[in-house]
Amino acid sequence: VSLAASLAVTACTVGPLLEEGRAEAVRPVAAAVETARLMGTVQALVDGHAADAKVDCSSLDLSLIDQVRRPVCALSNGRARELVRQRLGALGLTVRDHPTLDATFPTTNVFADLPGTTRPDEVVLVGAHFDAFHQGADDNSSGVAAMLEVARVLSSRRFARTVRFVGFDLEELGLVGSTRFVEAGESEKVVAAIIFDCVGFASSAPNSQGGLPGFAIPTVGDFLAVISNQASEREALQVRALNARLGLMRVEAVVAPATGAFPITGNLMRSDHSPFWLRGKTALFFTDTANFRNPNYHRDTDTLDTLSPEFLTGVTRVSAAATAYWAEEVLP
Ligand SMILES: [Zn+2]
């Protein structure tokens, strides 16, 4: 049995994928996403990384680190973290720090809750890492901007469930911030999560999409990859169905076998959703597939002008709609 065959998407057996009325009700949420705001936020983040002090790499044994794929001495996080803090606060949300003191890798995740009205103990989480190599336009200012725009659009509305917005620290050094966040118990109430990592790069050129070993995906890099494990498969299919209904963009659902924690699926485990999967939590990884599509991955050429504003807008619209759908908007 080939891996591709074993990954065939299974039909959902319990009820319809989407509730008609609620799916239609999130249309205005998607429409409220603004391209100019998104790109303005990416610009501010990129400028911040360019001007920021780099993390102290003097204690690291650089001979053990691949400086091409992981240029650790070009990593920054301080100004981007401050921007996340300030933007979430400006929406009227109470912003909290989740600091971990550590001699080598101190981290401070930043998060804020939009409290649910009737089921506040059920959390829909939207997260992205704010640390970046070089200017980090695609990786991951695009994801942080998407998270902040979803927060802006949702914060003027009310939902039955709590929506939690998170900026994760030091993803690039091995999912450090998100792992600590989950280990601290901050994921316990999560019923669904969207994690953004690299959501701004697209191309319509033939063969612009590299192959993802073990998975059948298109060869043109103009789609959003929605990556799930089996426990999160229904939510991945809901995103795809919601996107189709709202007519937003090209979405491909990629489902990893079982928990997702297999060596062959290592490429699907490379971001902050991974600690959630390992904790048995429903989480989706939204990505343009990073180095499988973007030649600027982890290079100083990962700049704003290489991004597609239309693509980033589409991703953010799908995400705002899915988050609102799961959180269940309380309509007046
Ligand atoms: Zn990243």
Image (spheres, helix red, strand yellow):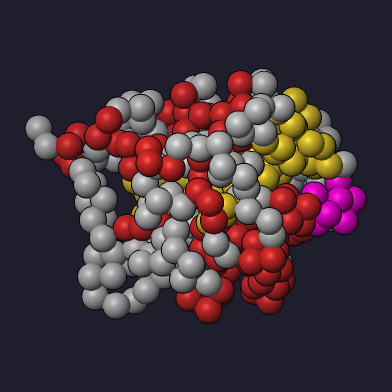
In terms of depth relative to the viewer, which is nearer, 20 or 117? 117
- Magenta range is 85-93
Is residue 130 positioned above or below 103 on the image?
A: below
Question: Residue 89 colored magenta?
Answer: yes
Looking at the image, residue 79 sits to the left or right of residue 283; the answer is right
Measured from the top left, where is residue 32 in percent x and y? 71, 67
- Could you tell me which residue is drawn at 24 percent across and 40 percent down? 8
Measured from the top left, where is residue 86 in percent x and y? 83, 54
In terms of depth relative to the viewer, which is nearer, 254 or 185? 185
- Could you tell me which residue is drawn at 69 percent across and 60 percent down? 52
Looking at the image, residue 224 sits to the left or right of residue 193; the answer is left
Is residue 23 positioned above or below 51 on the image?
A: above
Where is residue 43, by image quadrant? Answer: bottom right
Asked whether residue 144 appears in the rendered view, the answer is: yes
Measured from the top left, where is residue 116 in percent x and y? 79, 36
Is residue 305 positioned above or below 214 on the image?
A: below
Question: Residue 136 colored magenta?
Answer: no
Is residue 25 positioned above or below 94 on the image?
A: below
Which quadrant would the N terminus be assigned to in this image? top left
Identify the main secondary structure in magenta. helix
Asked whether residue 30 appears in the rendered view, the answer is: no
- Could you tell me which residue is drawn at 86 percent across and 46 percent down? 93
Q: How many labels sit on residues? A: 0
In terms of depth relative to the viewer, which is nearer, 191 or 65? 65
- Could you tell me which residue is drawn at 41 percent across and 66 percent down? 296
Measured from the top left, where is residue 235 in percent x and y? 49, 40
